[in-house]
């Protein structure tokens, strides 16, 4: 079946109230039984032992993606990873930028470990070919790998248990791809640990998870911790930046990273934090990040690799002739396929300021073409972009020297009128919750993420793998919103 023949506007099939109730009951119960969970709202930042959890927001149906596009995205992440792995000289420029902030020039660990997620939306333009287009490439704190495996299992279970009431010929086991992200991502972290130990590190060293205070998405992290211990025999510890201000130290002669009070040696520093400015409220926090950076421990990611995931880098890679520089030996046809997944992007500072003081061509073009654009700064974590009609006023207020931090990107034209059933946990007080509606039908947009990891350094890729995928679905009325904050839900792939 050709991709264009699937009628997105007819998705999902209609449910009777009885069918809906059955699916909601089965889905929420299974989510709770299998750790598809968040800590409840209001969980305090000092991380007391949890007593209860709520199911993560979830979709009742998997989300349709044309089969060839899905398979292509899985292939392409390997290309993209090789690109990131080989951008050493490019990273070098970024590297020098932050190196000036350091008081020591010593780098004692040359390997970088990346757990990546490349995100895509399905693009159906008014004219021209439909295809998946890349939204962004994430190199730090990529989340929902573990929960995405659980939601894929959940949809498979609903299919087994109910056949989805035979409502659609597309809802069959062959169309639900496997998703072994937990084992795959843990393998990446384990590869970092093994590389550390085999270059002289202690076999009893541990992986450090650097986490945010009051994190509610802990189960997504814990599944990795359990897999590391149970399959690879590797212990982990969890610390916030605030903990690390005082608990972390680097041995002056060996550069070994140690965590007090017991003096645990750290093999891999795995960041599930550290990507937002408010996580560094004072210089001490930056100093702590640099302390970990200078140690022998393998960082997932290094600061350089974190910077390589920036939108500016994505924009530069999209320029003619650039991506091939980082993919030597890759056939031009594959490079073209990769490039075909990029949307048009440019810097707001492009063209420079004219002698008469006019604004740069990049800013002018963004103003003129604003109805089809999104502007993005060098930030992660959602909620930072400026869309369409908000763009002219925003450009009017943007100080000239900040233009270079922003890129303009053509909006991906997502399938129209696709519906979804979104289910979230409600009031936990059953006595007062009454007839609370927890499943809502909405017009939605689904974003696909493909996970991969790479251990590389000195221009060589030591080990890498593509490991699984994620779908997040959100109500179309909101421009964006992370799963944890807005009303968006975890979802899975239905190949159509
Ligand atoms: P972040 O690093 O904050 O997640 P993203 O680049 O992923 O930044 O942008 C956040 C959200 O904005 C995406 O999840 C997507 O919903 C929307 N978005 C970003 N770029 C585009 C685009 N080119 N077309 C349509 N939507 C986009
Ligand atoms: Mg991002
Ligand atoms: Mg994103």
Image: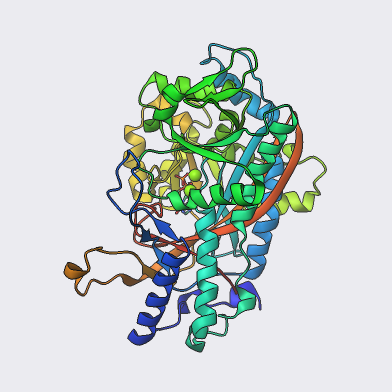
Residue 331 seen in render: yes
Residue plotted at (60% across, 47% down): 228
Whole-percent x, y for residue 297 in the image: 62, 28
Residue plotted at (65% across, 75% down): 2
Residue plotted at (57% across, 77% down): 6
Up-down relation of residue 7 to residue 404 (above or below): below
Residue 356 seen in render: no
Classify residue 246 as left or right of residue 329. left
Of residues 31 and 395, the one nearer the viewer is 31
Classify residue 274 as left or right of residue 325. left
Residue at the far front in the pictured view: 262
Up-down relation of residue 167 to residue 472 (above or below): below
Residue plotted at (65% across, 51% down): 231
Up-down relation of residue 3 to residue 219 (above or below): below
Of residues 298 and 229, the one nearer the viewer is 229
- Quadrant housing residue 171: bottom right
The N terminus lies in quadrant: bottom right
Whole-percent x, y for residue 136 in the image: 54, 47
Classify residue 38 as left or right of residue 120. left
The C terminus lies in quadrant: bottom right
How is colour applied across the structure in the image? rainbow
């Amino acid at each position: 079946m050709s991709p264009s023949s699937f009628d997105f506007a007819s998705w999902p099939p209609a449910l009777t109230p009885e069918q809906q109730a059955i699916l909601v009951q089965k889905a929420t119960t299974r989510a709770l039984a299998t750790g598809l969970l968040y800590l409840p709202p209001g969980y305090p930042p000092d991380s007391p032992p949890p007593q209860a959890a709520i199911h993560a927001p979830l979709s009742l149906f998997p989300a349709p993606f044309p089969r060839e596009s899905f398979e292509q995205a899985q292939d392409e992440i390997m290309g993209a990873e090789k690109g990131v792995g080989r951008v050493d000289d490019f990273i070098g420029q970024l590297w020098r930028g932050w190196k000036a902030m350091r008081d020591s020039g010593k780098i004692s660990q040359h390997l970088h470990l990346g757990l990546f997620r490349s995100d895509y939306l399905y693009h159906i333009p008014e004219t021209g070919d439909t295809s998946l287009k890349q939204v962004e490439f994430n190199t730090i704190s990529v989340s929902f790998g573990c929960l995405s495996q659980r939601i894929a299992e959940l949809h498979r279970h609903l299919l087994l248990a109910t056949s989805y009431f035979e409502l659609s010929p597309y809802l069959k086991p062959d169309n639900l791809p496997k998703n072994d992200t937990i084992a795959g991502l843990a393998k990446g972290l384990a590869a970092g640990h093994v590389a550390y130990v085999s270059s002289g590190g202690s076999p009893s060293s541990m992986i450090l998870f650097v986490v945010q205070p009051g994190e509610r998405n802990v189960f997504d992290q814990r599944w990795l911790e359990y897999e590391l211990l149970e399959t690879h025999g590797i212990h982990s510890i969890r610390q916030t930046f605030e903990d690390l201000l005082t608990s972390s130290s680097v041995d002056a002669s060996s550069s070994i990273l140690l965590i007090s009070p017991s003096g645990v040696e750290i093999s891999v520093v795995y960041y599930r934090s550290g990507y937002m400015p408010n996580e560094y409220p004072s210089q001490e926090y930056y100093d702590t990040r640099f302390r970990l950076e200078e140690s022998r421990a393998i960082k997932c990611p290094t600061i350089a690799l974190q910077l390589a995931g920036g939108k500016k880098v994505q924009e530069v890679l999209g320029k003619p002739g650039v991506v091939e520089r980082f993919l030597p030996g890759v056939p031009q046809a594959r490079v073209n396929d990769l490039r075909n997944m990029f949307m048009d992007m440019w810097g707001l500072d492009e063209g420079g300021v004219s002698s008469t003081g006019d604004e740069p061509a990049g800013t002018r073009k963004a103003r003129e073409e604003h109805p089809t654009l999104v502007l993005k700064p060098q930030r992660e974590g959602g909620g930072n972009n400026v869309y369409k009609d908000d763009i002219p006023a925003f450009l009017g207020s943007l100080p000239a020297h900040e233009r270079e931090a922003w890129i303009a990107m053509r909006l991906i034209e997502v399938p129209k009128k696709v519906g979804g059933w979104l289910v979230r946990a409600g009031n936990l007080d059953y006595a007062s919750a009454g007839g609370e509606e927890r499943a809502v039908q909405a017009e939605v947009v689904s974003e696909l993420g493909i996970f991969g990891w790479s251990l590389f350094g000195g221009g060589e890729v030591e080990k890498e793998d593509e490991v699984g995928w994620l779908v997040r679905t959100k109500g179309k009325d909101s421009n964006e919103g992370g799963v944890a904050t807005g009303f968006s839900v975890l979802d899975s792939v239905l190949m159509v």
